[in-house]
Amino acid sequence: MDVLIIISQALLYVSFALITGYFVIYTVPERFRPSVHVPDKWIIGSLIAVPILSFMPVLYVVLLLSERFGFFSSLSTVLTSYKIGFSWDIVFLISAELFIFFLIMRKRPTKVLYALGAVQVLLLIAAVSWASHAVTMAPMLGFFSDFLHVVAVSLWVGLVLMVSWFSSNYANWEAFLKWFSPVAISAFGVTAISGLLLTDTLVPHYMTGVSTNYGQGLLIKHLLLIPLVFYALINGVFVKIKMKNPTFDPRPWVKIEAILLLAIFVMTALFSQFQPPTLFLAEENVSKLFLAVYDGAVESGMFAFMQLDWWGLLFIVLGVIFIALIIVCFFLNAPIWLPMILGFTVTTCFYLFMMSTVIFKTVIIQ
């Protein structure tokens, strides 16, 4: 069931990105973007998928309760009395309304209708965010942090998906970059700030938290942002140099950015299903991945510190070298799979840097 929930949440985020990107990109005049054609089946599939995928955490709670109260009694109780169930009720209603709205709108679409669709997607994300872990820990701060986080990433990923996977050409690319670059920078800023608020709300101590599955997922997600920043730099700045060549197609590099963003979505879905860490290490909550790379002693009550050593410096240097190689690949027109692999290698180097510098010690409280 845990694996099913993780997969469902990852696909849910992808669905949000698709419908967000779809409704937003078509509000932009054609002279400011490449030609984009999104088959109706992708949007219909996403709108149908949202209530189904968001129901998986609800089903998990229902199954836990059904052992004592029966399935249908538990289902009724969760949908009418639990926050996670009430949240899903709203998701279902908005999804159904948005589905009908889309079927009517596609016969005679206008920019106003696309904008109205985008507003409804915001309401849909808000309904899902209301049942997040963060809301349990800090109701208002948790809700707004989670909501803004998902909206910013969905907008960024959605627009990248539209122009990289659903565009028929790369016309008006420079005009597209003029407005998309500030949007992407703003989305990254909102994502970073809301992510910090979520981390501060859910993780009492970041370094100690890396010993848990939740902390490992959060760490990898944050480290994936390092190569993402450089892909975004290439696609937003360096690409203008190459665009002087009329035969240069920028879309493959945007596809790499999209793939990395989707990987971040998967990591978000992965760690969000685990129990947030406590202030001190708890042996029963230690991640198997953490134990595989950490060679020190692990005991309940320990606290994490950072201690830089030569191994840590080596991994930083290697990470910087691989970042430089990504930029070199762009200017030398290397096969597109190479910088994509290098991006994940950069993340691996910085992950090994973090894991080689963390040490756990027993804290004696007097």
Image (cartoon, helix red, strand yellow):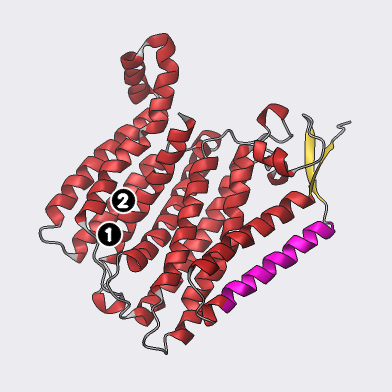
Kind of residue at disc 1 = Phe
Q: Position of residue 73 (x, y in %)?
A: 33, 14
Whether tag 1 and tag 2 are in contact, CB under 8 A, the answer is yes
Q: How crowded is mark 1: few (under 14 residues within 10 Å), some or many (20 or more)?
A: many
Question: Residue at 60% across / 62% down in the picture?
Answer: 226
- Please say if 175 is above or below 187: below
Q: Where is residue 64 in the image (x, y as percent from the top left)?
A: 45, 19
Single out the residue that lies furthest toward the bottom. Answer: 244
Single out the residue that lies furthest toward the front. Answer: 335
| Nearest to N terminus: mark 1 or mark 2 | 1
Q: Where is residue 264 in the image (x, y as percent from the top left)?
A: 51, 53
- Please say if 161 is above or below 122: below
How far apart in space, not on screen, are marks 1 and 2 (Cα)?
A: 9 Å
- Is residue 325 covered in magenta? yes
The quarter of the rendered structure image containing the C terminus is top right
Q: Which image quadrant is residue 343 in?
A: bottom right
Question: Residue at 37% across / 22% down in the picture?
Answer: 78
Q: How crowded is mark 2: few (under 14 residues within 10 Å), some or many (20 or more)?
A: many
- Position of residue 230 in the picture relative to residue 108 (left or right): right
- Find numbered disc 1 in the image and state the secondary structure of the residue it sits on: helix
* Residue pointed to by mark 1: 23
Of residue 176 and residue 183, the one placed in the foreground of this image is 176
* Residue pointed to by mark 2: 121
The quarter of the rendered structure image containing the N terminus is top left
Single out the residue that lies furthest toward the left. Answer: 107
